[in-house]
Amino acid sequence: MLRRSPLPGPLHAALRIGRPADIWYKSALSGVVAMAVPYAALLAAGRLDLALYTSAGALCALFGHDRPYAARARTLALVVLGMTAGVGAALAAAVLTPSPAVLVAVAAVLAAAQKTACDAFRTGPPGHVVLTFVTASACFAPQRAADLPLHVGLTLACGLWAWLVCMAPALVRPHGPERIAAARALEAAARLARANTAEAANPADTARARHAAWQALLRAPATVRAHVHDELVRREAAGHGRGGTDADPRPAAGTAPDSGPWQAWARALRKGRALPWDAPAAPGPGAMPPGPLPLSLLLPTGARVLAGSALAGWASLACGVGHPYWAVVSAASVVQAGGAPSWQRALQRVLGNLLGVALFAALVPLMRTGQAAMVLAVLVLLAGAEALISRNYWLGTVCVTPMALLLTEFGGSSPAGELVGDRWTDTLVGAAAGLLACALVTNRRAADRVDAAVVRVSEAHAAALAVAAGAGAREADRARDRLAAALVDLREAADAAAGEWRRTAPGERVARAENDGHRALAALARGRAPGSGATLM
């Protein structure tokens, strides 16, 4: 029997604690190593006042851990360059103007640019918030023109160090990310099979499991997709009442009759073992991931970040708060692509910051014992944030908040009560300003993106049906990957458009396109048996 949550539906959805990310420890370890080495050097030199600039580059190590190493190298290079450019622009502004109001405007412009760039290039977690936190803080760091080359150089050098830290595992497991993607696909498909049995009781779990399975499958190598794809379609079709003539729920040749072997295969992949498939071969490439989003679709969200961040920073100044950049960061983190996700993020931000400032207040006596204790605390909190934030944003923010406050302490101690009060005030101001910007700046492109995604699904659907009967293996593979990618993109577009109060997303068209698309995938599965697989080396 399912236990009913005592919270209302929207609150439960916003505060629900989910599963931890399967590779959270990789980003946590990379971030800790990337930050610890520069911190040790600064401690030895007695220059922890430079920690903001070394942290800026080191925090780039949190990006790209779900990507194959070639893609990771490109993503990390872009993040490092973006971080360095942002820090350089913020420090230059700090040198050129003493006006806090102007500096807030600069921080808001940088926040909007970072949000737009991260969404356009799909950098993935942790997204633009890390970049915005660093650059907004740098706008208000006391600065001299003569120190600019050193400070920007430290950011770039530590960014390059972070790049090396994140790429180093390629020397030991060059295909590790592909194996993890394959394991995720198997595990997500197994969860979908389990969720199908309880769909009547909890359809939301089935929808989440289905979306996770398709996302993971699109990143998996072809050798795994050939074995998982058709069986995943059959399980989904059977679980959603599309059996009979539309789908054969029986396992296809070469696939597992239940989810048990899939879990065992996933464990084998994670441990570097071979799978019991036909002939050994090098791993094939994964499906093509979605490309960059058009800039026109992202401008409304960027405008919201710009308006909300500027309004939050100026309101913070009007309240007499000494750290207005915290309000800028709060507003930038609250603004999401859709109205409903923004409300959820605001609630999560407020709750997490409230608990985080309480944790900081409890840690202050320990932190004031010496700089080494402060450094150790920052590293522990960074690891804790990475461990918790994938379970829910508010939970990770409980660790992020005291970490941000401790980074402020490196530049000089301030009364703990003042820091706690400023942080809490800026959180409330930033959340309110971010939500106000979402209400005032209409995202007319959200529904347009849904319309475009529906068209892409329809086109891919038609192409899939055209090759369903009598197509060769290569053509069927391309058709099903294209259709699956279009369905994933449609679901993300529909989620982003949720809650836009001035525009209504075409819900019936989305549901019809998704149903038709999955029926077409089932037809492809019926049209041919899974292709011969190969062992991931």
Image (cartoon, rainbow, N blue to C red):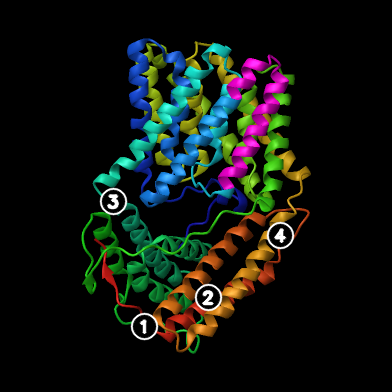
Residues marked 2 and 3 touching at CB (< 8 Å): no
Determine whether, in the image, residue 134 is placed left or right of residue 442: left
Residues marked 4 and 1 touching at CB (< 8 Å): no
Q: Which residue is mark 2?
A: 518
Counting other residues with Cα less than 10 Å from the Cα at mark 1, is it few (<14), some (14-19), or many (20 or more)? some
- The residue nearer to you, when weighing 88 against 289, is 88
Task: Determine if residue 390 is in view.
Answer: no
Task: Determine if residue 229 is in view.
Answer: yes
- Which quadrant holds the C terminus? bottom left
Q: Which residue is mark 1?
A: 529
Residues marked 1 and 2 touching at CB (< 8 Å): no
Mark closer to the observer (3, 1): 3
Question: Which of pointers 2 and 3 lies earlier in the amino acid sequence?
Answer: 3
Question: Magenta segment: does it hold 163?
Answer: no
- The chief SS type of the magenta part is helix
Q: Which residue is mark 4?
A: 447
Question: Which of pointers 1 and 2 lies earlier in the amino acid sequence?
Answer: 2
Give the residue drawn at x 33%, y 25%.
37
Mark 2 vs mark 4, CA separation in Å? 22 Å
Question: Which of pointers 2 and 4 lies earlier in the amino acid sequence?
Answer: 4
Q: Quick one: SS at disc 1?
A: loop
Q: Which residue is mark 3?
A: 174
Q: Quick one: SS at disc 4?
A: helix
Instruction: Say if 357 sits above or below 162 in the image.
Output: above
Quadrant position of residue 516: bottom right
